[in-house]
Amino acid sequence: MYEINDHYYPRLSPLSTGVRCRCPRCGEGRVFHGFLQVRPECSICGLDLSEVNTGDGPAVFIIFIVGLIVVTLAAWVELAYMPPIWVHMVLWIPTILILSLLLLRPFKATLLSIQYVHQAREGRVDD
């Protein structure tokens, strides 16, 4: 437990709050409004989320994970059944789109939570 403004907050797992797309401090407020738009602050505890920037990190993780899954399955289908190319296109293009969209929000929220836990900030040069 730690105290902020006379409120006590439990230490939450970044993975738990990220997968649920919840505030990394209180675990209750929603992180997003819209699909990937980060809220300026948590509606429950008031945590300032306006400075958070995950950059391209979530997209890179998604590319690697979805790519590994789809390439493995496509190779297995090709070796086992040898279907025509249009079957691969019908199978894997929707799979890539669906998996990417399903995983993007939780990965972005998880990276946001990790930044909060480790107090990551934009690099600055001290004067």
Image (cartoon, rainbow, N blue to C red):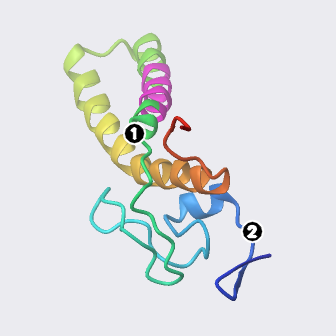
Q: Is residue 120 above or below residue 77?
A: below
* Observer-nearest of 2 and 31: 2
Residue type beneath disc 2 = Arg
Residue 33 is left or right of residue 65, and the answer is: left
Check the picture and name the quadrant holding the N terminus.
Answer: bottom right
Residue 116 is left or right of residue 73, and the answer is: right
Secondary structure beneath dot 1 equals loop
Provide the residue span drawn in magenta. Answer: 61-72
Residue type beneath disc 1 = Gly
Tell me where residue 117 appears, x and y as whole percent.
Answer: 66, 56
Q: Which mark identifies residue 11? A: 2
Q: Which mark identifies residue 15? A: none
Tell me where residue 73 appears, x and y as whole percent.
Answer: 46, 24
* Quadrant of the image occupied by residue 4: bottom right
* Quadrant of the image occupied by residue 40: bottom left
Residue at label 1?
55
